[in-house]
Amino acid sequence: MAILDYFILNWPKLIFAAWFSIYNLILVAVFLKEHRYLIERFLVGFFVSSAFMSIIAEIIGVHFYNLIIDNGILTDPYDFFFIAVSIFFDALFIFIGGNLFTHFTGLKNYVGASIYMEYVCLERLCLVVATNITNYILLYIFFQFALFAIMRKNMAYLFKATSLKWRSIFIYLTGLFYILDLLYAAYLLFPELGTNVINIQNLFWLDSMALITCSFVSGYISISISESKEHDGKIEYFERLQKSQEDIITTLAEMSEAKSGETGQHVRRVAEYSRLLAYKLGLSKEECEDIKIAAMMHDLGKLMISKEIIEKPAKLTPAEYDIVKQHTQYGWDILSNSEGDLMKMARVIAVQHHEYWNGQGYPLGISGNGISIYAQIVAVADVFDALTSERSYKRAWTSQEAYDEIIKQRGEQFSPRVVDAFIECYNQICVIRDTYLD
């Protein structure tokens, strides 16, 4: 058979290849708001579609089988071998098509592969259930609209879902694909199934197996979507709770900063610097988010210092300075009755952020890694921002002057490791400073 004959014989598949491409263009335009390169996207979708790929697989599979027969490797036609060859090349080109679809759409992490396999299974189901071209086309249209009706309410969610277990869905769909391929192989083993002289019981049994299996996989996908929505709902709730907590802490921190003549923007800058440094140092995502909030409370103890001392425009006397230094212990005391990892981090930062790497800091005089990594981070963030901020008793240093001072104090006042991280992300720190100007 000439290659062109395969495409002529499988003309309905070419229609479905075009439909696959058009349908995905519609979804991308509606849910991803992407309207560029429509012709290119259509052509890519058409040629990587499972319908088109299955024709290519059939051409190569048949030619490979004939090559084996013609060269005498198998003396007689062998149905089971032909089925194995057909399934192998079918699976191979579906794998190739799925990877190309994922690459060109950019839908990574099994998202594109799962969407692709869904259409593969849809087409295979039609091949199993249909007995001629007419009802093959009608069934494809019916199943396509049925699939859309089932997924319509979840369509927008699927394009933004972050917790959906796409890998598991892909594995189930792949299993369904092989089952449907094996069921379709029954038409090769029992040719009478594809004729008008058929055994209704056998055909009913074949179709029932295909539909029941599809129903189970569809049910699993629906359950996965429901579980993912429930999980995302909980995450959203905790994010709102965290945001409310952050707003309260920010207000409280701004009160302490306002009392000392500093601004709420100082609180925000130190928080953002600290998160950036924590990320650069390889702390976990949870720690990076927590230190952003905990850092806001580093000077909370200043609320307990008298206004006359805190707002004094002139240089403090040694006695007054000793009183100011007590704000670290006051911060610990204020936060000591609060539970949770975030508050534990906040009170450690409050009491230790004036400790020096060389042990010359206060209030405990601890040194090196005896100082919490969280306090090490906030110490650098706080001093850099204090140096570059104007106060009633001093001018603002330039960013370069402050940068040089941080470097100078590496291994003295500050942790060498944190200073190295500061150097690496200095440009990003400057961007944060420009974003939250006083």
Image (cartoon, rainbow, N blue to C red):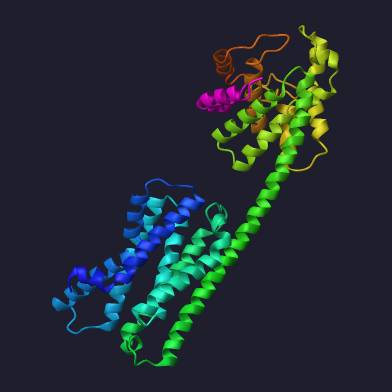
Q: Is residue 291 left or right of residue 254?
A: left
Measured as percent of width and height from the top left, residue 119 is found at 42, 66
Most common secondary structure along the magenta stretch: helix
Which quadrant would the N terminus be assigned to in this image? bottom left
Measured from the top left, where is residue 358 in percent x and y? 64, 21
Q: Which of the 4 quarters of the picture holds residue 349?
A: top right
- Counting the numbered discs, the total is 0
Camera-side residue: 11 or 76? 11
The vertical placement of 20 against 68, above or below, is above
Q: Position of residue 406 (x, y in %)?
A: 58, 18
Q: Residue at x 72, y 24 (%)?
A: 264
Q: Is residue 334 above or below residue 317?
A: below
- Along the line of sight, which residue is nearer the eye, 160 or 243? 160
Residue placed farthest to the left in the image?
71
Magenta stretch bounds: 414-438
Q: Residue at x 71, y 30 (%)?
A: 296
Q: Nearer the viewer, residue 142 or 214?
A: 142
Q: Is residue 264 above or below residue 68?
A: above
> Magenta stretch: residue 426 in it?
yes
Q: Quadrant of the C terminus?
A: top right
For residue 348: magenta?
no
Q: Quadrant of residue 130?
A: bottom left
